[in-house]
């Protein structure tokens, strides 16, 4: 039969001393009333259903605490738009499995807005966008080489010295001129001096307009194809990084939510141990217990305070890393989306069957060989672009016997002294042919190297297919395992809460030792922490699943 000796003391302390605190505000003050649902003889104490008493101006109204009796954690009531009405949130074990809320690209979710902000502000992503834009400009440049190219040039030279050539024109003509002068008895034929002409032109200019046109050039065709496929490589690199960034932002945000949940858990635990310390002090004051229970309770307070400080530090670090990914100030405030860490969900999801995540698996199973999955992964697009680049190299190497044919046309002025007139005007047109015929087998060796590169890329594609299939399989298994583990952790939280409630009541009635209450409180706190970590694992595995299936829509 229960000992009622401490009943006056309990009435003296007041029922508010044993109020069980919830995670958020309720209408009035919520206390846990244990008058109903008390364990009967021969029945399990866990089966007792606690009743949440809501205080109002008109008195107390009993409301079943569904979050405690159905396997979940008691969470704050959600106020309706009209105000004044609270809706209890069902526990996780009553509704099935937990899945993260999936924000649609056009939605208004807090996390989705943060993802958009990260995609717009990430510096590394900006660099990849610059590389992609540079590749597109390279393709335009490669295409422009097929059109005629025109250029204007002018050259004026002054020279003195250097090599020269001696022309003995005097020695050749002076003898004949002397004979003619004697025959004609005149001096009509003067003597001529020998000449020396410089190779370097002095006071010479060449001003012209030059037009060139490639008629047949396999190098230009190869260059255009390479630049076209380089765009695909750069775009795949950017999209791969974007998907990795989305996963990193999601997981960083989930880590911040979990660390905030840990702070809430330790804050609640701190209020419990402080209440235990106060009750223990009343026991000592009324000579109902010795002083060591107060010291033990104070040790519990110090331990929980230390854990709370560590949890707050982890939350600060998680917020700093999250802001780092968004290129914001490290101490910027982070808006919390409580729906992601809420114990209850409205949708039961099985990754093998359907729902928010199941649709991905159903579509993959419906296609043979994972064709849908392969079509969504940018890594395959990148390898295929490399294969086309290598195929273009092979085609180019095999065309080594194809000649290069270019046409040119020059029009301008040239001559000694800068006098652009009719005497210095000239035009020059022609066709240039380059035909490589022999390179000692170098071309055949280059063809063999290109064929080896093609075979290597084919093997890389097969290896990537197997790697992605393995990654998908392990990610699905990890996601299912996290969901199953969360079910067990939810049951553990419910049991730990009920165990603490019973231990607290027995301790207040003087029928339990303080060490039993401390152990029950420790188990309760640890089970809640493990549950929050389990929720974090589910959210992280869902982010991994979204990354593996490339299901995020940009």
Image (cartoon, rainbow, N blue to C red):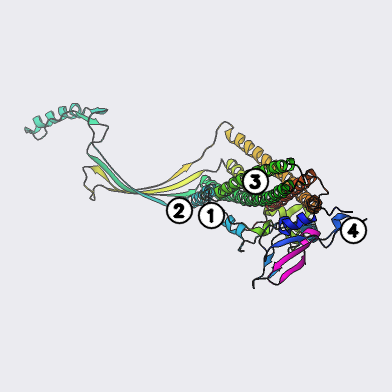
Q: Of callouts 3 and 4, which one flags the residue occurring earlier in the amino acid sequence?
A: 4
Single out the mark in the foreground, 2 or 1: 1
Q: Which residues are magenta?
A: 50-69
Give the residue number, with chain letter if any, for mark 1. 120
Task: Report, in whole angstroms, how far the alpha carbon at label 4 lies from the one at label 2.
Answer: 96 Å
Task: Report, in whole angstroms, how far the alpha carbon at label 2 lies from the one at label 3.
Answer: 72 Å
> Magenta stretch: dominant SS?
strand
Give the residue number, with chain letter if any, for mark 2. 147
- Quarter-of-image position of residue 518: top right
Give the residue number, with chain letter if any, for mark 4. 40
- Number of other residues with Cα within 10 Å of mark 4, as a class: few under 14, some 14 to 19, many 20 or more: few
Q: Helix, strand, or loop for circle 2?
A: loop
Single out the mark in the foreground, 2 or 3: 3
In-front residue for pair 407/276: 276
Give the residue number, with chain letter if any, for mark 3. 308
Single out the mark in the foreground, 3 or 4: 4
Q: Of callouts 1 and 3, which one flags the residue occurring earlier in the amino acid sequence?
A: 1
Image quarter (top left, top right, bottom left or bottom right) of the N terminus: bottom right
Image quarter (top left, top right, bottom left or bottom right) of the C terminus: bottom right
């Amino acid at each position: 039969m229960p000992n009622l000796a401490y009943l006056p003391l309990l009435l003296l302390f007041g029922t508010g001393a044993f109020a069980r605190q919830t995670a958020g505000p309720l209408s009035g003050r919520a206390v846990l009333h244990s008058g109903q649902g008390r364990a009967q003889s021969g029945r399990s104490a866990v089966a007792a259903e606690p009743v949440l008493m809501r205080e109002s101006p008109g008195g107390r109204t009993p409301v079943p605490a569904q979050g405690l009796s159905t396997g979940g954690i008691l969470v704050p009531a959600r106020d309706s738009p009209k105000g004044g009405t609270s809706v209890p949130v069902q526990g996780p074990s009553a509704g099935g499995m937990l899945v993260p809320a999936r924000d649609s690209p056009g939605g208004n979710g807090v996390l989705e807005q943060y993802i958009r902000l990260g995609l717009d502000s990430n510096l590394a992503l900006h660099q990849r966008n610059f590389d992609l834009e540079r590749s597109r400009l390279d393709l335009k440049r490669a295409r422009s080489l097929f059109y005629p190219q025109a250029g204007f040039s002018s050259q004026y030279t002054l020279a003195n010295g250097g090599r020269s050539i001696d022309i003995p024109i005097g020695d050749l003509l002076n003898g004949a001129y002397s004979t003619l002068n004697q025959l004609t008895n005149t001096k009509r034929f003067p003597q001529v001096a020998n000449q020396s002409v410089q190779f370097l032109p002095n006071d010479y200019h060449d001003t012209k307009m030059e037009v060139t046109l490639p008629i047949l050039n396999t190098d230009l065709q190869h260059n255009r194809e390479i630049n076209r496929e380089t765009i695909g490589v750069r775009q795949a690199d950017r999209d791969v990084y974007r998907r990795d960034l989305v996963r990193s932002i999601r997981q960083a945000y989930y880590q911040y939510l979990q660390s905030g949940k840990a702070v809430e858990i330790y804050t609640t635990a701190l209020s419990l141990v402080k209440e235990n310390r106060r009750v223990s002090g009343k026991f000592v004051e009324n000579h109902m217990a010795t002083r060591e229970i107060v010291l033990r309770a104070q040790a519990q307070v110090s331990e929980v305070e230390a854990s709370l400080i560590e949890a707050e530090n982890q939350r600060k670090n998680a917020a700093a890393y999250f802001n780092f990914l968004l290129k914001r100030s490290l101490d910027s405030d982070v808006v919390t989306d409580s729906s992601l860490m809420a114990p209850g969900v409205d949708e039961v999801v099985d990754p093998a069957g359907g729902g928010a995540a199941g649709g991905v698996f159903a579509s993959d199973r419906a296609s043979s060989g994972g064709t849908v999955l392969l079509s969504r992964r940018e890594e395959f697009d990148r390898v295929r672009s490399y294969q086309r680049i290598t195929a273009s190299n092979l085609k180019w190497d095999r065309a080594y016997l194809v000649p290069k044919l270019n046409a040119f046309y020059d029009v301008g002025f040239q001559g000694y002294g800068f006098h652009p007139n009719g005497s210095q005007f000239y035009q020059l047109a022609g066709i240039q042919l380059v035909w490589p015929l022999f390179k000692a087998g170098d071309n055949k060796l280059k063809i063999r190297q290109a064929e080896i590169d093609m075979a290597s890329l084919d093997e890389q594609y097969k290896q990537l297919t197997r790697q992605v299939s393995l990654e998908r399989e392990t990610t699905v298994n990890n996601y299912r395992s996290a969901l199953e583990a969360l079910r067990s952790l939810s049951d553990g939280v419910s049991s730990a809460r009920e165990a603490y409630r019973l231990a607290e009541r027995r301790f207040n009635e003087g029928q339990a030792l303080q060490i039993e209450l401390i152990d029950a409180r420790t188990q309760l706190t640890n089970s809640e922490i493990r549950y929050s970590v389990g929720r974090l694992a589910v959210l992280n595995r869902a982010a991994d699943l979204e990354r593996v299936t490339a299901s995020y829509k940009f």
